[in-house]
Amino acid sequence: MAISQVQLSTRISYETALRLDHMSKETGQSKAGIVEAALKAYLDAQKQNS
């Protein structure tokens, strides 16, 4: 059986945490979903630039 998700633990600034909380409440998306989408977009952009 394949693992579909892994847990990632990291630290972010207080300001970023507030922005993430606000975005989550505003959009109804989970914080994990927002972080995953942002990380995917960042990684995709880095791949295109290399």
Image: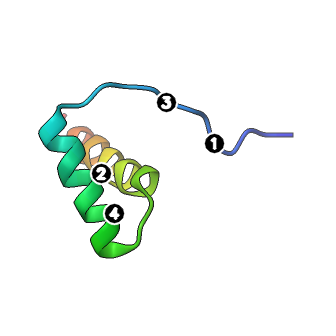
Precedes in sequence: disc 4 or disc 2: 4
Q: Amino acid at mark 2?
A: Ala
Q: Amino acid at mark 3?
A: Leu
When the figure is inspected, residue 28 is found, relative to residue 48, above or below; the finding is: below
Within the image, what quadrant is residue 48 found in? top left
Secondary element type, mark 4: helix
Disc marking residue 24: 4
Residue at the image point whose x is 30% and y is 25% from the top = 11
Precedes in sequence: disc 2 or disc 3: 3
The answer to whether the residues at label 1 and label 3 have Cβ atoms under 8 Å apart is no
Query: Split into 4 quadrants, where in the image is the C terminus?
Result: top left
In whole angstroms, how far apart are the C-alphas of marks 1 and 3?
A: 9 Å
In whole angstroms, how far apart are the C-alphas of marks 4 and 1?
A: 20 Å
Q: Is residue 36 left or right of residue 26?
A: right
Residue 2 lies, in percent from the top left, at 79, 40
The nearer-to-camera label among 4 and 1 is 4
Q: Amino acid at mark 1?
A: Gln
Precedes in sequence: disc 4 or disc 3: 3
